[in-house]
Structures are given as C-alpha cells and as structure tokens.
Amino acid sequence: MGIQEARGSGPVHGDTGIAVVDVVGVSALDSAAPPAPSRIEVLARRAARGDVVAFDELVSLHETRVANLAYRLVNDATDAEDVAQEAFLKAFRSLPRLRDKSQFTGWMLKITTNAARDFLRRRGRREEVSLDAAEHAPAPSGTADVVAQQVTQERVRYLLATMPRKHREVLVLRDIDGLSYEEMADILSCTVSSVKNRLHRARAAFRLRAAPYVEEVLGE
Amino acid sequence: MTRPDATVGCERFRALLDSYLDGEISRAEESTARAHAHGCAACAREVERAIAARSLLRSVAAIGLSSGFRATVGARVRAEQGRRERRGRWLRVLVPALAPVAAAAIAFALWNPTSKLPGSPSTTGVATSAAPDAAAGHPTPEEPSVAIATAPEVAAEPSRLAAKPHAAPTARPVARPRVGASRAVVAGAPHPRDGAPSYLRSRGGAGSAPVVAAPVVTAKIPEPDAVFVASAGTRYSL
C-alpha cells in the first residue's frame, strides 16, 4: 500500500471506528472534499517542471529531517550529509515521475533510506554500522546533568548503530521519525504485517540491550 | 486486530504491549490491558520500561548540517538542470533533423530488392544448387568487385547467386579467385610451396607467378553455370 493510499483510505477498526494510521498528526480520515494543495505539493509540482528555486525551498523544508534520518542510518555526520545530498539529487531527477506530488515528504524519506542502504552496501557495512563513529562523537561538556544526558545519548546512539540494519530502520522510522506502519511499509517495500513483526522484534532487542540505561532513566 | 479478551494475563499483556502503547488495539482490549497493568506491578513496570526505552531512542542527538550543505545541493541541482536543458535542446534539434533520414533509410530498406531476408522464397529455392559456387569461393552479388567487373550478367541474376550471402565476405573476393585460378593454371605442376626457395616466392619467382595470372582466369567467368563448371573442374583437378 502506498503512502497516498494509507492517507486516503486508512484502515479503521471495524468495531471502534478508530483510525490506526495517524501517528504523525496527519489524519487518516481526510474529509471527502479534495483538500487544497499543500505548499509542499505546489513546490514539488514547480520543481518537477525544472524550477530549481522551488526545489531549493523543498530542500530547506526537508534537509533537517532527511539528514537526520541518514545520520541515524549510517551513523556518521559527514557520511550522512553525503547521503542526504545524493538523496536530494535523486529526488530532483525523479520528481517528474512522482505521480502524486503531495506525497513528496514520504517519497523523499524513501529515497533517503534507499540512499543510505546503497551507501552502506558500497562501504561493505551490510549489517553493522562502523563503530568508529562512536569514537568521533564530541566530548560531553557543560553541567553534570548535561554531560550525563550527552553520555546517555551517545550510548543509545551506539546501541542503535550496532543493531542489525532492518531493526535499526524500523526503530528510526517509527520511534524517532514517527511514521505510520503504512508509510513504513511503503518506504521499506514490505507489508504492514512485516513492518509490525520487525518492529516488535526490534523493540524487544533494543529494550534488552538498553536495559541498564533504561534503569538509569527510571531511577532518577 | 486482536481478539478482545476480558482477562488478560501477563504473557498476553506483554505481547500486546507495543500495540497498546501505539494505540493499535481496540478500546475493549485497551481497557482490559489497562486494568491488568493497574493490578500487576511487574507489568506496570514493564510499561514504564518500554516508555523509557522509546524516550531514550528519541533522545538520540540530531546532527547540525554544515553551513554549505544547502549551497552544495543547490549547485548540484543546477548542474543537473543545466544538463537536462542541454539534452533537451539537442533533442529538439536532432529529432526533426534525423526523422527524414530515418524514414528514408526505412523506405530504402523496404524497397531495395537485393536486401533479402534469410528464408525468403527467392533465396531458399536456389540455396542447395548454388552452394557449391559459394563453397568454392566464386563471386556472388555480395562481391561486386569481381562480379561487376568481369561478368555483368552475373549481377543481373541476383536471385540465383544470392543463395549464400554469408559464404564470401566482401573483403575476400579477390583473394579466393586468385587462389583457385592459380591452381587451375598450374595443374599438375609442383605446388608453389614445394621446392621453390622462399626468397624466390617473395620476389615473384616461380612460386608466385600463378598468383599474378589470377585475374585472367576470373575474367573468363561469364555466367553462373560456367562458374559452377569451372569451379568443379578446378576442384577436381586438384
């Protein structure tokens, strides 16, 4: 199911009427009247016709999200910028072929995920992300609380980076980026059921590995 | 969707935990799960752990992009757009210019009677009878340098001699008649490779003389039948 389909006709629990798609604040049950094109859709249409200024604006709207997704998948800031650049360039090339321009954001995240996969494949880091990145993390500084928080962040990042790629992808897309199952299925090119199963296993594995830090958080 | 259950055990509750936190279960399931969590300290603690793990994941620091990121992307996008426009300009020029040429080439290929497809009736019918000619290296319509110069009537019957268009490549028609003719002229004489010193052969001595006489023989080929007889005779004389 595509992202557009997920948004347009999201599944509804038969006995409750609760839409299960909405996770990031976008209602699955849009009103019947066709909505006015969003700003992103308008920009995407212009960019598809070769308007580079419109694409610049799309880049400025998405660069943080795209770069951070890439960063969490490849676990290196410099590599993440390269991946993000490649993703934007691929998006510009392929934008005329995107049928529903309102789906630009999800489509952009899919391109970014694929670009990160390609990058990791080229680097030969199929399942394990390089551990060097943890050593290059900036040294914690500031007050004791801030230092403790930064240390915990680095530990969690390390945990995430050393998880299998498939687990890492679903954790990043769902628990950090907040995408719906349908959007994740579209991005990862698999079924919603597969996404749920993968996510369940990934969360269980992460909870197990992060148990000491979780206890720290709970003990405060 | 999971089946509503009035009583949820610990194992069932933990299996539902992620869906419960995601709001992916029905209201009935949610109420029973909540009731279980209120009554089970271990499962309540499990809920807290799961929530804390998710908040830890969200706490992973984001990166700050370098100042030149947007400019770099913009420059690459503009370069791509420039390439796209140049490609478009070339296509706008080339397509109208090449369309008549392509149309003419197609029309010529369809009209030209000598361009025969393999297996067409005009070629397959003669294929077996003309095969010895081609095998002997005699001229075919695909060998214009010999056929046109020595026997115009041969070229006038393309359907009979087009039997094996692949038998003699165009680059070789001169060499083959010369070899065959030299053998015909010096039939019974020692082969050029026999006895004659190499320095004589290389300087046009006794060994190389028949090769020089080759065009005379090929010039005597008047028509396909004669070609066949001559080739047969030549072959048998060897």
Image: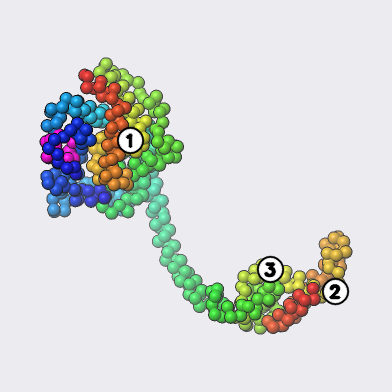
> Between marks 1 and 3, how big is the CA–CA gap?
67 Å
Residue for point 25% across, 35% down: A175
Give the letter of the chain under mark 1: A
Residue A145 percent location from the top left of the image: 25, 18
Specify the amino acid type for callout 1. Answer: Arg
> Residue A208 location in percent, x, y?
30, 28
Amino acid under label 2? Gly
Q: Chain of mark 3?
A: B
Q: Does residue B106 show up magenta in the picture?
A: no
Pointer 2 local density, CA inside 10 Å: few below 14, some 14–19, many at least 20: few
Label 3 belongs to which residue?
B172
Number of numbered tags placed on the structure image: 3
Distance from disc 3 to disc 2, alpha carbons, whole Å, reads 26 Å
The answer to which quarter of the image holds residue B233 is bottom right
Which stretch is magenta? Answer: B20-33
In front of the other: A126 or B40: B40
In the rendered view, does B139 fall on the left or right side of A176? right
State the image quarter where residue B39 is shown: top left
Q: Could you say which disc has been placed on residue B188 in the image?
A: 2
Counting from the top left corner in percent of width and height, residue B196 is at: 87, 64
- Tell me the chief SS of the magenta region: helix
Q: Is residue B139 visible from the viewing direction of this image?
A: no
Left or right of B217 on screen, residue A212: left
Q: Amino acid at mark 3?
A: Arg
Q: Does residue A18 sit above or below B206 in this rendering?
A: above
Name the one closer to the observer, A4 or A167. Answer: A167
Disc 2 and disc 1: Cα gap in Å?
88 Å
